[in-house]
Amino acid sequence: MKLSAGVLAAAAAIGLSAVGVTDAQQTQPRCSSVYTRKELLSLTPTEWNTVSGVLRTMQNQGWFAWFAYLHTNWFSQIHSQSQFFPFHRRFVYEWERVARQYNPAYVQPYWDEMRDYRAPATSAVLSSNWVGSNGQGTNRCVMNGVQGGWTMSYLGNHCLQRNFARSGNLGPWYSPEYITSIIQRAPNMTVFRPQIEFSLHGIVHIETGGDMATRASVNDWIFMLHHTNIDRLWWQWQQNGHLWTMDGPNWDGTQISLNTNIAYFNEPIRNVMQLGYGQMCYQYATNPLSRRSLIGGVENLISSVLPPDVLHKWFPDSAKVPSITFAPGAKPPPPSNGKVIPYPREIPDSWIVSMGNDLANAKNARADARNFVEAMNKAGYKSPY
Ligand SMILES: *[C@@H]1O[C@H](CO)[C@@H](O)[C@H](O)[C@H]1NC(C)=O
Ligand SMILES: [Cu+2]
């Protein structure tokens, strides 16, 4: 596509560099400033005060109920097909936009779930200091953390519920190595979407249980932490050569494209593809906590342990980037300290079917995750994570 003189002049007027305009897909202006979404546990006490205060206000003003209603009402249009990523990016952004009207210092944090994948229930995220732990009593009501004792009004008044799987232990979930492998291997949205939706995405919903395992999962603020992390993973993949990649089915049976409208929001998917443009004026922090997962770092370790054929099958980028320079303190410990990667918990067929999701895709995604662990263990790989 050739850029017209008018487009170039408009781009110059809004201050895009030559590098910026080579992106012919981008029709939105670059943000004049961006804010940074951080891992929850890296928030300062002041930042957490801001966030938790806004959440209480939003609960009192009915926003939890409104967003839970939206997610429920549009459920079948936004899951199990390619709208999944763009819809949820726009949805989390909408939540953040409302929150920032109450306090402009609100920035939506994420939960780095790969960091906690071996024993998620022991994560500080699920402690009384942050989002609270498992539900209590016969009704599984959440009694501690930022939503402790809350009554949710959608659908019908009830206490916020959680019912952790595995007798409250949760997990194991999906390793940083596996998520990194998906990001390196998935060639298009048709492959990438189910691999994330039916691994990490689904298991956190199901295993948290209670409200999180229903269509009204937005009642639990873990939803926002979780989907912000899922959005971060999509962005990682986009930055890995897939900035404008959008293909596969739309909910109405047509093929999706960048010009397809996002369900409910009625604006083209194109508008939310590139962070730092249009309304998407945020970026993701790479702080010391999140560096542990989604790691350039692990590749060096992996490539020193795995036989070349195994390496190239599961980590094709390691052939392109033979060695990585570590930031001080970021180098993974030697393999002798490592542990075998456990098989991840899988999403049951019954849940896939009850949510109206695509069972064949879900089965493929499960098999891929299992084959990965088997290949790593067979090769004698020990994980530092
Ligand atoms: C996505 O990639 C898979 C695997 O290479 C391929 O079979 C499929 O046709 C691709 N689909 C699209 C829409 O590009
Ligand atoms: Cu959803």
Image (tube, helix red, strand yellow):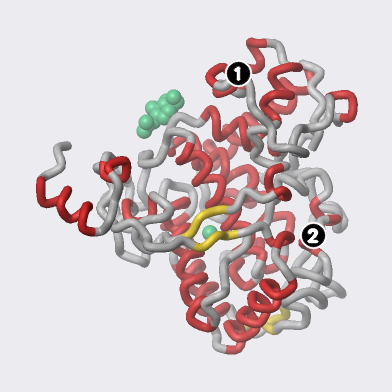
Indicate the quadrant where residue 118 lies: top right
Residue under the point 25% across and 53% down:
27
Residue 264, above or below 113: below
The numbered mark at residue 322 is 1
In depth, the one of 384 and 198 nearer the eye is 384
User: Which quarter of the figure is the N terminus placed in?
Assistant: top left
Position of residue 157 in the picture relative to residue 24 (left or right): right
Residue under the point 69% across and 84% down:
151
Q: Is residue 21 visible?
A: yes
Q: CA distance from mark 1 to mark 2?
A: 41 Å
Where does label 2 land, which residue?
164
Horizontal and vertical percent position of residue 346:
70, 42
* Mark 2 surroundings within 10 Å by alpha-carbon count, few (fewer than 14), some (14 through 19), many (20 or more): many
Mark 1 or mark 2: name the one nearer the start of the chain. 2
Horizontal and vertical percent position of residue 299:
67, 26
User: Which quarter of the figure is the C terminus placed in?
Assistant: top right
Q: How many numbered dots are placed on residues in this image?
A: 2
Foreground label between 1 and 2? 1
Q: Provide the secondary structure element on which disc 2 rests.
A: loop
The numbered mark at residue 196 is none
Q: Provide the secondary structure element on which disc 1 rests.
A: loop
Indicate the quadrant where residue 45 lies: bottom right
